[in-house]
Image (tube, rainbow, N blue to C red):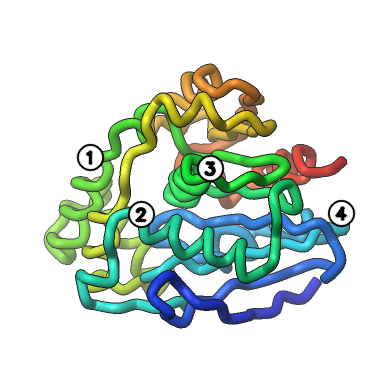
Amino acid sequence: MSETAHTFKGAHGDRMVFHEMGPADGRPVILIHGLFSNAQVNWIKYGHAGKLADTGRRVIMPDLRAHGESARSHDKADYPADILADDNLGLVDQLGLGPGDYDLGGYSLGARTTARMLARGAKPGKAMIAGMGLEGLLDLSNRSDFFRRALEGAGTHEKFSSAWMAEAFLKTTGGDPKALIHLVSSFPAVPRAALESFDMPIMVLSGAQDSDNGSARALAEALPNATYVEVAGNHMSAVTLPDLGDALAGWLTP
């Protein structure tokens, strides 16, 4: 099934892009990719979006600010706290989607963005938080510091170290380090009390070997209406394997 690209206005009026697959009259699901990735790599390349489209879903996949085909400003002022939630709450509004009219999910940074959107009042029918643990939502300073060091030390990391792997992945996706260095300072935590308000059905999905953002099982236990689903892989490999798309399609099929 073919993919089309569309533009929308970001929180500062910036030119943002979302990719779409599936029938225009299908129930919308918004999927948000992870840090250093983009919609093409996270959702389209390995067939996850196609599986959803084949079930009749309208799959909407934004490229986050500083990623993919969306705005890549090098001005720090364009990356205030919670800018990703601002951008994507704006996308929901611009698509004309009201409470319960759509589903919402994300992987890693996309999961954190999803959680921030929920904390600020987004009301999807169902949600997915993937590649994310409880600690990664409550206190993300360690991960933000890690990615900042990875970007600032580009070209100097020990081969096969975690920072070297992050830099290598960024090169494969064509990411912009000068934009991303500002973005990684814009991620707010999600207060534990806010998690209790996430009362829609939520799938917490994690690779079996993924503990990069803390415990996904603990996150599922902290949510009032969550289902924990484990798939094959670690934080990097889970998105390349068919299990993730199968689990997502199963969760979102009526």
Label for residue 170?
Answer: none
Residue that numbered label 3 is attached to: 118
Question: Contact (CB < 8 A) between labels 4 and 3?
Answer: no
Between the residue at mark 1 and the residue at mark 4, the CA separation in whole angstroms equals 39 Å
Secondary structure found at label 2: loop
Give the quarter of the image for residue 127: top right
Please give the name of the residue rendered at 71% of the width and 75% of the height, measured from the top-left corner: 3
- Label 4 CA crowd tier, 10 Å (few <14, some 14–19, many 20+): some
Sequence order check, earlier mark of 2 and 4: 4
Between the residue at mark 3 and the residue at mark 2, the CA separation in whole angstroms equals 12 Å
Label for residue 55?
Answer: 4
Q: Amino acid at mark 1?
A: Ser
Label for residue 82?
Answer: 2
**Left or right of residue 32, residue 154 in this image:** left
Sequence order check, earlier mark of 1 and 3: 3
Mark nearest the camera among 4 and 3 is 3
Between the residue at mark 2 and the residue at mark 4, the CA separation in whole angstroms equals 33 Å
Q: Amino acid at mark 3?
A: Leu
Mark nearest the camera among 1 and 2 is 2
Give the camera-side residue of 207 and 136: 136
Please give the name of the residue rendered at 86% of the width and 66% of the height, measured from the top-left corner: 25
Q: Position of residue 114 (x, y in %)?
A: 52, 47
Residue that numbered label 1 is attached to: 141
Sequence order check, earlier mark of 1 and 4: 4
Secondary structure found at label 3: helix
Q: Position of residue 80 (x, y in %)?
A: 27, 61
Between the residue at mark 4 and the residue at mark 3, the CA separation in whole angstroms equals 25 Å
Quadrant for the N terminus in the image: bottom right
Q: Position of residue 12 (x, y in %)?
A: 38, 75
